[in-house]
Image (spheres, rainbow, N blue to C red):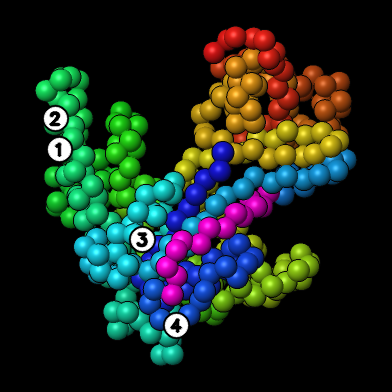
Amino acid sequence: MESRFGIVGLPNVGKSTLFNALTNSHKANAANYPFCTIEPNVGIVAVPDFRLDKLAEVAGSKKIIPAQIEFVDIAGLVKGASKGEGLGNKFLSHIREVDAIVYMLRCFEDDDITHVEGNVDPIRDSEIIETELILSDIESLTKQLKNVEKKVKQDKLYAQQVELIGDILKVLNSGSPARLLVNDSNSQEIKKLNLLTSKPFFYICNVEEENVVNGNKFTELVKNKAAQQNSVSINISAKIEEEIANLDDEIDRREFLKEIGLEESGLNRAIKVGYKILNLNTYFTIGPKEAHAWTYKTGTTAQKAAGIIHTDFEKGFICAETISYDDYVKFNGEQGAKEVGKLRQEGREYIVQDGDIMLFRFNVSNNQK
C-alpha cells in the first residue's frame, strides 16, 4: 500500500523547495510569487529503513526494494480559497485525494521573500488554511446531506447517516474541524464522507539553517498548538534539505548532517511522523533475489498482509512463515533462525508485527475468503 501526503500552506512558505528536496527532483517550480504551482506535483519517495539494508546484507539479496510514500505538492491557499479566491476549489479538490495533510508553515523572516499576509505569523497562517478547509467541508457536506435525505424516504437506514452529517455540520459551523468527532465507532463512516478536516495531519515548520535544531519563537508557538490538537510539529529547513538532496554520496550526506547537528534528514523525520499518524508499519519479504519492504496498517492480519503483495496470496492463504527482525539478524538468516526454533508458522488471524520477515504459503486453487 502506498500512502499519499499532501503538502499545503500559504504561497511562498517553501513548499515547492521542500518538495524538490524530498523527491530529489526539480519538478516543482520554486518562484517568489503566489500560484507558481498550479497543478499538484507528485513525487514517489523511497522510505528509508536501515533494517532493509541489513536484511539484504544477511540474505545476500541482489535487489533492494524499499517501501514507497507519495508526496503531493499542492499550490498555495489564500483567504477565500473555498469561495474560489486564488485558484480556489481546484486546489482543495487535490487535497481530498491524499491520506494525510502536512501543514507547512513559514517560521523564518526574510525581507526578500514576499509573505502574502504581510508578516510572519505561523499560527494565523495555520488558521487561514484550516478555515478554508472547514468552509470547503461545509459546502461538500451540505450537498451530501441533500442527497442522503432523499434516500431516507426509500430506506430508513440512511437516517443514521443524516444524523451523523448533521452532527458534523454543527462542529464545522462552530469553526472546528471534523476530526474532533472521529472515534473508533464512526471513523469508517466519516471516512466515506471524504472530508478535508477529518484527515490526519501534522505541521512542518520551515526555518532558517541556524534554527533547524532548536527552533525559534515561531516554532514554539506551532509546537504548543500541535500539542493542543493531539498532533506534532517538526522543524525543517527546506534549503538544507535541498542541499542534502544534491549530495550524491551517502557518506557526504551524513557528514553534512553531523556538521549542522542533525542525526537524520528532515525527509526521514517527516516520513516517521507520517507513518505514526497513519498507524503504518513495515514487514519484509527477504530472499536471494530481492529484499522487499511492505507497508501495512497496524492491526493487519497475516492473511490481509498477504493480499498487499497479491490478491491470490490472500485468497489462497495457508500460513505465513514468520521470523522477527532481531531473530533473523541474530541467527544469520532464515536457515539459522529455523534451526533454533525461531521460525514460526502463523495462521490467517495472526496480527503482523513491525519488522516481521514473512514467507506466505498459499494455494491458488484455495477458495477460502
Q: Which of marks 2 and 3 is in front?
A: 2
Q: Distance between the residues labelled 3 and 4?
A: 19 Å
Q: Residue sitting at 60 percent across and 17 percent down? A: 315
Quadrant in the picture for residue 167 = top left
Circle 1 sits on which residue? 146
Which label number is shown at residue 150?
2
Numbered disc 2: secondary structure: helix
Magenta stretch, residue numbers:
36-49
Across and down, in percent, residue 63 comes to: 81, 44
Quarter of the figure that contains the N terminus? top right
Numbered disc 4: secondary structure: loop
Circle 4 sits on which residue? 32
Q: Residue sitting at 38 percent across and 77 percent down? A: 34
Q: Distance between the residues labelled 2 and 3?
A: 30 Å
Mark 1 is on which residue type? Lys
Across and down, in percent, residue 22 comes to: 59, 63
Query: Nearer the N terminus, badge 3 or badge 4?
Result: 4
Q: Distance between the residues labelled 1 and 2?
A: 7 Å
Marks 1 and 2 in Cβ contact (< 8 Å): yes
Circle 3 sits on which residue? 91
